[in-house]
Image (cartoon, rainbow, N blue to C red):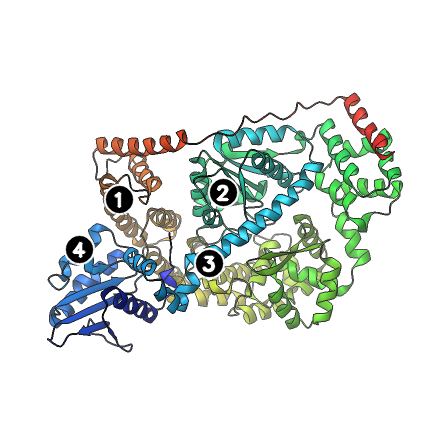
């Protein structure tokens, strides 16, 4: 179904859209007036006989239903009575329940002739779907139209997924079965969602690709997710089996790379939706420590039973035979001379490798595959492989210290200053601002692309990022090891998100390892922070400047560096009502309030004001159950910082809103429970909320049982219509048999002859 983001419209845009829609709908001309005191009239149609049609447009998408109703009852109703039009129409971007419409109708009658003359968000969107030429007439609507953007995004996701499927061939060539495969497959069959966790390079991505390939072989369609959980919804198809693949879903290096506004909620909603869908599977990968960080920071993630969905890959999975299989597969498929391949059949060559305490599939793969590290001689290759296992950083250190020049290193550090890569055209702009030439950029890209960097098309643009996570890991260590490198990295910061990434990747809070090194460059950091605090973002410009995040970061940096200059940047932003009321997400806002509460150097009046504004912001939009959940999580997370009763009163108001919303949702479901547009999953959430709190709520328990039975009947009907794939086979048994390894490795000699 077509959807539109009305929040992207300005107040005047909304009036203009309403004018065009209602003119098309009613077949008459409406007047629109210049900005100013409207006396209750935004649009008007006067007939020759003196009858009048008045339209009032209320673009209150952040204020919410309660404030709109209060305003109409106390202010607008008097204005309408004074005008006394023949017919009055109210159009608003607020989502209206039946109860809300009834209250508005009572306040505005007899001028509003029926509740149908009150157009809420749903009715506005329905008219937009009906009158497509109005959408095309208004640029902001066209840019956010689902029919336009979803088609482009879906095409991009399909293309990306097809490219990923082709990569599976390489993974299958070198993969060696181990116990983690059977564990993960069991989780997917029983839970339908599996989070594969482990240390860097342990084989999480390879395992997830092999699992995905298994399901593709049984008829599943592959959908790769790379940006956020919403991508899955663009290609969701109830009718066909699908496997969704999300590599490094929490980021490659730090948690802050991935989880944007409400992404934790969207991710869990997607996981729940797939868990309830018999013909869907979901494979995600992450590093164990990042998953632990996420559960500490996000209450929703902490409450989720990740343990039952998680398969941890560790070194114990790599038995003697499994390690030998990995080495064998990589040597067999590598571009090595027959003589070098044959040499690996010698126990004196393969045993030190597969018995090494730091055995890691990625190190084996990179060492054998990267032509920059290969000399073609047996002794050199084996020595390289053992040395890289002993010191994994050596894989990239060899290239950086022996084969790259200063311009190449500058480019690597510039990419390091962004989390998640950067579009090539934006990189060129930034490169020029850092006094580089286009010619040097092109030359360095030609040297590094395919080795330490990779280029890929996303949403019609070429993005540059690190070839794999181990490159970023190495560069972090490389920069940390030298104060001069830290300074050179700071000098490349021209946008605030670079400063943010620098502080996230090189943490200093609490006197961390980088704190003292940063103190050496405090004046340089102060200069950079002042220069970039108000800078436009170079990535994702449409999201604007997240001043809440900027304020929080400056408070953290100022405190840890002992910098009054940077601290004041944060305090000044936190003291601005507009900054808080235009927050992008509740997570960063909660972090800002926590920092304000814990820092004794900051005037507590700033905290009190911020809490008041934050409460107003979070209660401004309670139009669905997930937003109410988010509001409750947020309010409870900041309750301990509130010196008064502001948060307590907000929680009471939220409880009242929940009751009203739940009652209306229940009545709607009971009345038209067969309608597929009624969100059954949300109805379950409503009921579970009251049951978990030991409260009957506004309903009888018999009614609860009736609705739950209807929902269960609906799910059962879907399950019975689904044809399950063929039985999955278990992974082959593992063995530590020395004889099996000897036989396997001996085939290298025979295959190379």
Which of discs 4 and 3 lies nearer the camera? The answer is: 3
Q: Earlier in the sequence, mark 1 or mark 3?
A: 3
Local crowd size for mark 2, using a 10 Å CA cut-off: few (<14), some (14–19), many (≥20): some
Residue at 26%, 56% in the rendered image: 65
Q: Earlier in the sequence, mark 1 or mark 4?
A: 4
Which of discs 1 and 3 lies nearer the camera? The answer is: 3
The percent coordinates of residue 696 (x first, y second) are 23, 35
Q: Is residue 725 above or below residue 675?
A: above
Judging by the rendered image, the residue that carries numbered circle 2 is: 295
Judging by the rendered image, the residue that carries numbered circle 3 is: 149
Q: Is residue 409 visible?
A: no
Give the Cα separation between the discs numbered 4 and 3.
36 Å
Q: Is residue 183 above or below residue 338?
A: above
Element under label 2? helix
Tell which residue pokes out farthest to the front in this image.
27
Give the Cα separation between the discs numbered 1 and 2.
31 Å
Judging by the rendered image, the residue that carries numbered circle 4 is: 103
Judging by the rendered image, the residue that carries numbered circle 1 is: 665
Give the Cα separation between the discs numbered 1 and 4.
17 Å
Residue at 58%, 42% in the rendered image: 286
Give the Cα separation between the discs numbered 3 and 2.
33 Å
The foreground one among 722 and 10 is: 722
Q: Earlier in the sequence, mark 3 or mark 2?
A: 3
Local crowd size for mark 3, using a 10 Å CA cut-off: few (<14), some (14–19), many (≥20): some
Element under label 3? helix
Element under label 4? helix
Local crowd size for mark 4, using a 10 Å CA cut-off: few (<14), some (14–19), many (≥20): some
In this picture, residue 710 sits left or right of residue 328: left
Give the Cα separation between the discs numbered 1 and 3.
30 Å
Q: Earlier in the sequence, mark 1 or mark 2?
A: 2
The percent coordinates of residue 715 (x first, y second) are 36, 33
């Amino acid at each position: 179904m077509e959807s539109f983001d009305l929040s992207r419209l300005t107040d005047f845009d909304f009036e203009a859209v309403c004018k065009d829609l209602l003119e098309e709908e009613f077949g008459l001309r409406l007047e629109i007036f210049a900005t100013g005191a409207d006396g209750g009239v935004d649009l008007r149609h006067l007939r020759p006989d003196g009858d009048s049609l008045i339209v009032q447009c209320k673009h209150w998408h952040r204020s919410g239903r309660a404030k709109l109703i209060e305003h109409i009852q106390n202010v607008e109703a008097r204005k309408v009575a004074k005008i006394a039009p023949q017919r009055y129409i109210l159009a608003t971007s607020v989502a209206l329940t039946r109860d809300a419409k009834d209250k508005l109708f009572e306040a505005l009658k007899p001028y509003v002739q029926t509740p149908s003359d009150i157009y809420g968000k749903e009715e506005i969107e329905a008219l937009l779907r009906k009158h497509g030429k109005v959408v095309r007439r208004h640029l902001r609507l066209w840019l956010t139209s689902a029919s336009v953007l979803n088609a482009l995004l879906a095409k991009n996701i399909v293309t990306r997924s097809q490219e990923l499927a082709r990569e599976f061939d390489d993974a299958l060539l070198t993969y060696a079965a181990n116990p983690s495969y059977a564990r993960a497959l069991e989780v997917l069959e029983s839970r339908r969602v599996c989070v594969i966790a482990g240390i860097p390079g342990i084989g999480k991505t390879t395992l997830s690709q092999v699992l995905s390939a298994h399901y593709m072989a049984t008829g599943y369609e592959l959908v790769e997710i790379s940006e956020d959980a919403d991508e899955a919804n663009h290609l969701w198809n109830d009718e066909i089996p699908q496997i969704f693949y999300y590599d490094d879903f929490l980021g490659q290096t730090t948690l802050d790379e991935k989880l944007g506004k409400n992404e934790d909620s969207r991710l869990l909603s997607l996981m729940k939706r797939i868990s309830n869908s018999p013909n869907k599977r979901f494979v995600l990968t992450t590093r164990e420590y990042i998953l632990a960080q996420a559960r500490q920071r996000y209450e929703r993630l902490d409450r989720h039973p990740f343990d039952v969905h998680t398969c941890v890959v560790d070194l114990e999975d790599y038995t003697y035979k499994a390690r030998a299989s990995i080495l064998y597969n990589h040597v067999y498929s590598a571009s090595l001379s027959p003589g070098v391949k044959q040499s690996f059949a010698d126990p004196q060559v393969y045993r030190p490798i597969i018995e090494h305490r730091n055995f890691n599939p990625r190190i084996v793969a990179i060492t054998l595959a990267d032509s920059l590290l290969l000399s073609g001689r047996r002794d050199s290759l084996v020595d390289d492989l053992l040395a890289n296992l002993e010191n994994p950083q050596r894989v990239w250190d060899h290239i950086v210290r022996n084969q790259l020049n200063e311009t190449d290193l500058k480019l690597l550090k510039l990419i390091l200053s962004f989390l998640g890569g950067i579009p090539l055209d934006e990189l060129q702009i930034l490169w020029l601002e850092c006094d580089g030439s286009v010619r040097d950029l092109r030359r360095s890209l030609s040297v590094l692309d395919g080795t330490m960097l990779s280029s890929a098309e996303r949403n019609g643009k070429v993005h540059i990022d690190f070839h794999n996570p181990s490159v970023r890991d190495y560069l972090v260590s490389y920069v940390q090891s030298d104060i001069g490198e830290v300074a050179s990295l700071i000098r490349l910061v021209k946008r605030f998100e670079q400063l943010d990434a620098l502080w996230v990747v090189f943490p200093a809070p609490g006197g961390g390892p980088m704190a003292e090194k940063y103190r050496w460059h405090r004046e340089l950091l102060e200069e950079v922070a002042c220069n970039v605090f108000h800078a436009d973002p170079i990535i994702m410009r449409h999201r604007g400047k997240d001043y809440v995040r900027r304020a929080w970061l400056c408070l953290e940096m100022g405190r840890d560096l002992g910098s009054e200059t940077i601290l004041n940047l944060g305090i000044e932003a936190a003291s601005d009502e507009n900054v808080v009321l235009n927050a992008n997400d509740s997570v960063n806002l909660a972090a800002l309030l926590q920092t304000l509460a814990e820092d004794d150097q900051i005037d507590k009046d700033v905290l009190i004001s911020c809490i008041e504004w934050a409460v107003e912001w979070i209660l401004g939009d309670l139009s669905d159950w997930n937003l109410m959940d988010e509001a409750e999580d947020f309010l409870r997370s900041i309750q301990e910082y509130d010196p008064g009763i502001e948060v307590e009163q907000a929680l009471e108001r939220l409880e009242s809103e929940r009751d009203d919303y739940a009652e209306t949702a229940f009545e709607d479901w009971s009345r038209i429970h067969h309608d597929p547009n009624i969100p059954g999953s949300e109805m379950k959430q409503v009921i579970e909320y009251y049951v978990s709190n030991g409260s009957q709520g506004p309903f009888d328990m018999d009614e609860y049982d009736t609705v739950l039975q209807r929902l269960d009947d609906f799910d059962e009907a879907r399950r019975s219509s689904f044809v399950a794939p063929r039985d999955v086979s278990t992974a082959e048994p593992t063995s530590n048999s020395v004889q099996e390894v000897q036989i396997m490795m001996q085939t290298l000699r025979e295959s190379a002859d």
